[in-house]
Each structure stands twice: as C-alpha cells, then as structure tokens.
Image (cartoon, helix red, strand yellow):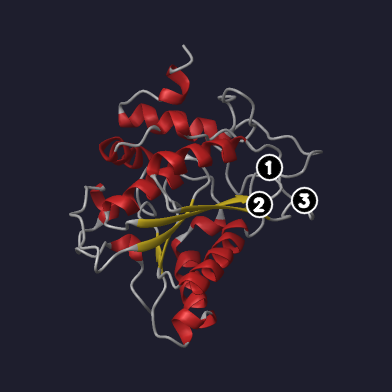
C-alpha cells in the first residue's frame, strides 16, 4: 500500500499536523497538478497550497453536477483567475438525475444545520467525490499529470463517507490500477489531501499566509446573493473563521 499524501509533502514535513508553509520545491521535480475546485474554502486553499508547493502549471476542474444553484461556479471562476491557473475546465454531470440529495432535488429543501446531528446529512450527494476523482483521473491520464489535489477533511466535515482517509486510499489505488499512466507507464498518480487531518480553522490560517482572498469563495448550500448563515456549510464556515481568529471577508465586505 502506498503512502498517502496527507501524511507529508515531498520535503517530509507532516502538513496535517500544523499546516506550516513548505519550502518551495524545484520545478524540475514538481510542475503540473490538477485541483478539484468548487469555489469553497477547502478547494481554494488547496489550490494556493499546490502553487506554494512548486506546481507552476495548475489545472482546475469545477463540476456542475445538477446542484440547485451555480453560485459556487461564480466563485470558482473568480478564484481560478486570482490564482492564475493555466486551465479551468467546467464539467457538466447529471448527478441530480436520481435525486437523493437536498443539494440536487428541487422538491427537497436544504435543512438548517444541526451541530448535534449524528449520521449522514441529506446534503450528501451519492458518491460525488468518487465521480469527481474519476473524471480527474481521466484528465490526468490524458494530459499525463501525476498529481491531483482535493480539499477533503475528516475533521471539520458533515460526516460524508467520501471525505474519509479509507476512501482516499482506495481511490488512489484504483486510479493507478485503472489508468495508462499508472498501470502501464509506471508513473504513479498521487492524491494530495493536505487537510484530511486538519481543522478548517487551520486551513484558514494557512490560507491567509498564502494570500487567499476568502471574499471570493462561497460555502452556502442555498446559493443566493448572501450566505444564509444557517445551513451546515455556513455553520462550519462561521465556526472555522471564529476559531481561526480572523474576519470572514465574504461576510464583512457587505457591511
């Protein structure tokens, strides 16, 4: 079983422990990377971290998967421009076709968040990260890119099963068994999950040091012009900024 990227970066520093800034790696070693970019806090910070870690050719993938609003896409485009990515692909999928999520089913409203909830919330989109990573693997195979970043965390999250280390480990193995790049050419595709064991507050502290403009990001499940402040995602975001000790500029800029 291979070593999974959340444990350490190429310099050997355990990123998830304190999220200190890594030393820049030589571009001859690290160059191209794919980032799954939703436009939220996690994926945006992951994008800036990839750039800091020496990847100078960044390919962002954003998915329209049938969610009820496209407010995230506005943020993803703004973040991609600000970070100077080489390519930003917006990929349309139909994960709403079979429903079973309040993020995609018009007849099923997004409920207010509940910090005391046990179990998986109804905002879970079935196998979403599995689908996203499969598309990213195809893109990586075609363009011969060996590094894929995804901003999942199993610390501050809603209990989604596809944000856990066991899933990431299995998915990396599947990608390397099922791509020409990994299976035939012997060039291992690596899934970078730098925040898997980090709190969202730690992410934000790191992002501030990396120069992330969090006013460009979006987290609210309900879309609209301003965050609702009551869905799970809004509550997690508010908690993270409060614990990080910094103002959320997405909120304060309108005051």
Q: CA distance from mark 3 to mark 2?
A: 8 Å
Q: Is residue 114 visible?
A: no
State the residue position of label 2. Answer: 125
Q: CA distance from mark 1 to mark 3?
A: 9 Å
Which residue ends up furthest to the right in the rendered image? 107
Residue 99 seen: yes
Identified at 36% across, 43% down, the residue is 199
Q: In the picture shown, does residue 26 fall above or below 235?
A: below
- Report the residue at 72% width, 45% height from top: 104
Q: Are marks 2 and 1 in contact (CB under 8 Å)?
A: yes
Q: Secondary structure at mark 2?
A: loop
Quarter residue 212 falls in: top left
Q: Quick one: label 2, few (<14), some, or many (20+) residues within 10 Å?
A: many
Q: Which residue is mark 3?
A: 99
How crowded is the residue under tag 1: few (<14 C-alpha within 10 Å), some, or many (20+)? many
What is the x, y in percent for residue 182? 45, 81
In terms of secondary structure, where does tag 3 sit? loop
Question: In terms of secondary structure, where does tag 1 sit?
Answer: loop
Label 1–label 3 contact, CB within 8 A: no
| Residue 74, above or below 18 | above
| Residue located at (30% from left, 62% from top) | 7
Dot placed on the residue nearer the N-terminal end, 3 or 2:
3
x%, y% of residue 238?
45, 28
Which residue position is annotated with label 1? 103
Quadrant of the rendered image containing residue 186: bottom left
| In this picture, residue 159 sits left or right of residue 209 | right
Q: Quadrant of residue 187?
A: bottom left
Q: Residues within 10 Å of mark 3 (few under 14, many from 20)?
A: some
238 or 37: nearer the viewer: 37
């Amino acid at each position: 079983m291979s070593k999974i990227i959340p444990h350490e970066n190429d310099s050997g520093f355990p990123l998830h422990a304190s999220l200190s800034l890594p030393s820049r790696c030589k571009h001859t070693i690290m160059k191209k990377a794919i980032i799954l970019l939703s436009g939220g806090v996690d994926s945006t910070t992951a994008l800036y971290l990839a750039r800091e870690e020496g990847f100078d050719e960044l390919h962002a993938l954003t998915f329209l998967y049938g969610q009820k609003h496209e407010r995230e896409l506005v943020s993803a485009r703004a973040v991609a421009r600000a970070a100077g990515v080489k390519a930003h692909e917006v990929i349309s999928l139909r994960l709403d076709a079979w429903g079973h999520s309040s993020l995609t089913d018009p007849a099923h409203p997004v409920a207010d968040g509940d910090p005391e909830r046990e179990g998986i919330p109804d905002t879970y989109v079935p196998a979403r990260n599995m689908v996203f990573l499969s598309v990213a693997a195809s893109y990586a195979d075609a363009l011969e890119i060996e590094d894929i970043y995804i901003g999942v965390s199993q610390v501050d999250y809603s209990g989604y099963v596809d944000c856990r280390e066991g899933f990431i480990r299995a998915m990396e193995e599947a990608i390397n068994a099922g791509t020409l790049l990994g299976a035939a050419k012997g060039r291992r595709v690596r899934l970078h999950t730098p925040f898997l064991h980090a709190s969202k507050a730690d992410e934000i502290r790191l992002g501030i040091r990396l120069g992330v403009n969090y006013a460009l990001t979006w987290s609210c499940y309900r879309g609209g012009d301003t965050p609702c402040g009551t869905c799970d995602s809004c509550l997690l975001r508010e908690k993270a900024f409060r614990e990080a000790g910094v103002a959320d500029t997405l909120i304060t800029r309108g005051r």
